[in-house]
Image (cartoon, helix red, strand yellow):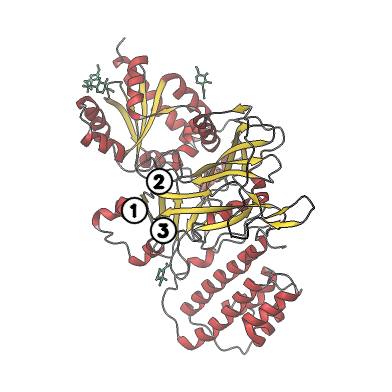
Amino acid sequence: PGNAGSPAPAPAALQSPPRRPAPRARLALLGALLAAVLAASRHSVGQGPAQESALKALGTEGLFLFSSLDTDQDMRLSPEEFKPIAEKLTGTERRDKCSTTELHPQIFSFLKRCVLILLWSTLTASYEEEELPLNPSEETLTIEARFQPLLPETMTKSKDGFLGVSRLALSGLRNWTTAASPSAVFAARHFRPFLPPQGQELGEPWWIIPSELSVFTGYLSNNRFYPPPPKGKEVIIHRLLSMFHPRPFVKTRFAPQGAVACLTAVSDSYYTVMFRIHAEFQLSEPPDFPFWFSPGQFTGHIILSKDATHIRDFRLFVPNHRSLNVDMEWLYGASESSSMEVDIGYIPQMELEATGPSVPSVILDEDGNMIDSRLPSGEPLQFVFEEIRWQQELSWEEAARRLEVAMYPFKKVTYLPFIEAFDRAKAENKLVHSILLWGALDDQSCSGRTLRETVLESSPILTLLNESFISTWSLVKELEDLQSNQENTSLRQLAGLHLEKYSFPVEMMICLPNGTVVHHINANYFLDITSMKPEDIEDNIFSFSSTFEDPSTATYMQFLKEGLRLGLPLLES
Ligand SMILES: *[C@@H]1O[C@H](CO)[C@@H](O)[C@H](O)[C@H]1NC(C)=O
Ligand SMILES: *[C@@H]1O[C@H](CO)[C@@H](O)[C@H](O)[C@H]1NC(C)=O
Ligand SMILES: *[C@@H]1O[C@H](CO)[C@@H](O)[C@H](O)[C@H]1NC(C)=O
Ligand SMILES: *[C@@H]1O[C@H](CO)[C@@H](O)[C@H](O)[C@H]1NC(C)=O
């Protein structure tokens, strides 16, 4: 479809605040009209049958209206074709001189919002074309979803009983208690996007879905409800994630977005591929405000034949070994910037797994006759699978690390667990560079993203950290647990020294090996003093590559150097 290529305009004008009921009569008419167009767009697939289904969905009048808009008769409303009606509804159409009816401003903005939502749905309605049809001669596998809802008591805002959070805001989250489809059948072929590019080396990451975000593109709008139509390799990932919830966005609003993979084992005819996907879900629908649910990451592996005609194993899951693994952000007002709530929480289980290897749905006997792969008794035939002899293998930990570095270049420097970092610092007589934050630093459930996207991955910083510091990061909650539950008093004291210097949301610290903090800076303060105004970026854009030094890198450099100046003399010599 011609309109699937370019991303649909983010409905910026959704920002108008029309949440009040509007006069009934006009809205009823409008509602009917919107429903008709919406239904038409949903059902407009292909030609002949589309006519029929459109007639069924819209009735004669609705189809007539639809056809009058669909000037190229492709049974689909392109944005151009949609424009006349959008203009009519929003009143931006040039008016006749004698036109008298002016819309009340509130109704006007309500209409505008409806039209934008509608326009959006029209553009995204081409999903159904991206259906993954099955062919009876190929192998299929069944994938099951296992889902346990987020534990509300793990959210920070639960501490005061969700005071000040409207029930409406959380209704999408509360309602999401089961997987949208507990089980689904896929063809082996649908997993082709997981195949490595020609000549890919073991352990060398490649992007299944590359990130399209950069410092210059910023992030994608929060004010959206429906994902854009998935294209190409996004289709399978979209379909898989749809098993959890109907509105997955395979590209996150914030960097690093996308899906990255690496080969962890190779045999004569099979690959094992491990992957990491950053995706999120929209839990609200109009007229509520958007609610974003962003798991830290989806990871997993697939074992597939080199021609993707057979899948031996598949698993995808949200890691649940840390105490928090989901970031949630929701709007509670019309303005995207001023009315955003943030929280993090813990989801115990979100997992997809193949029930077994893919098997052919029909089998040919010696005479070439098709036989069903189920016995007359209804029992499936037992298949025997050849044993795979792996020739090259990479450990799971190493593969996970490489995927992590591909997503987060700042991870080129090792960040050790808290206690280990101080043990190491003692052994090597070095200072500790420690980041203490409310959310995790190395996944998407995070309050540290601004930090890692800029300073922590810049090369002078990486070099200095690598040479002169032992680095670590921790969640506030982890240190609080250490402080209250740990029997070893020196570890309790270590955690206490850290927490003493912490303020929300992120604190960067330089410490002696015995835990004394010699220098620290709060991330909000840091961002305030380093933030560039848009004009500055414009002015500097041409010199960026050569001489221009990004102010946050320079400031972080200064912070580290000051830490060295204060800390080095105190190290035991
Ligand atoms: C939640 O579920 C209730 C009852 O099934 C339904 O009325 C409501 O619309 C749902 N809310 C959302 C946001 O899905
Ligand atoms: C860190 O230092 C080690 C040894 O000095 C070196 O091998 C490695 O490449 C360095 N890494 C980075 C990211 O600079
Ligand atoms: C407490 O923990 C530290 C650091 O791991 C260790 O060196 C020390 O031996 C422990 N002390 C006790 C009494 O277990
Ligand atoms: C850590 O060492 C420094 C320098 O030797 C000392 O001033 C400080 O009191 C020590 N801190 C603790 C908690 O032992």
Q: Identify which amino acid the numbered label 1 is placed on.
A: Leu
Ligand 1 is within 8 Å of the C-beta of the residue at disc 3? no
**Rounded to the nearest whole Å, what is the CA distance between mark 1 and mark 2?**
11 Å
Q: Position of residue 221 (x, y in %)?
A: 52, 56
Which residue does the image show at 71% across and 42% down from the upper left?
307
Q: Position of residue 260 (x, y in %)?
A: 58, 40
Q: Identify which amino acid the numbered label 2 is placed on.
A: Asn
* Number of other residues with Cα within 10 Å of mark 3, as a class: few under 14, some 14 to 19, many 20 or more: many
Which residue does the image show at 21% across and 36% down from the upper left?
484
In the picture shown, does residue 366 fall above or below 511?
below
Could you say whether the residue bearing mark 3 is in a helix, strand or loop?
Answer: strand
Q: Badge 2 is on which residue?
A: 325
In-front residue for pair 31/380:
380
Q: Earlier in the sequence, mark 3 or mark 1?
A: 1
Could you say whether the residue bearing mark 2 is in a helix, strand or loop?
Answer: loop
Q: Earlier in the sequence, mark 1 or mark 2?
A: 1
Q: Identify which amino acid the numbered label 3 is placed on.
A: Trp
Question: Which numbered disc, 1 or 2, marks the residue closer to the eye?
Answer: 1
Q: Badge 1 is on which residue?
A: 151
Which residue does the image show at 67% across and 78% down from the upper left?
54
* Number of other residues with Cα within 10 Å of mark 2, as a class: few under 14, some 14 to 19, many 20 or more: many
In-front residue for pair 502/404:
404
* Number of other residues with Cα within 10 Å of mark 1, as a class: few under 14, some 14 to 19, many 20 or more: few
Q: Badge 3 is on which residue?
A: 330
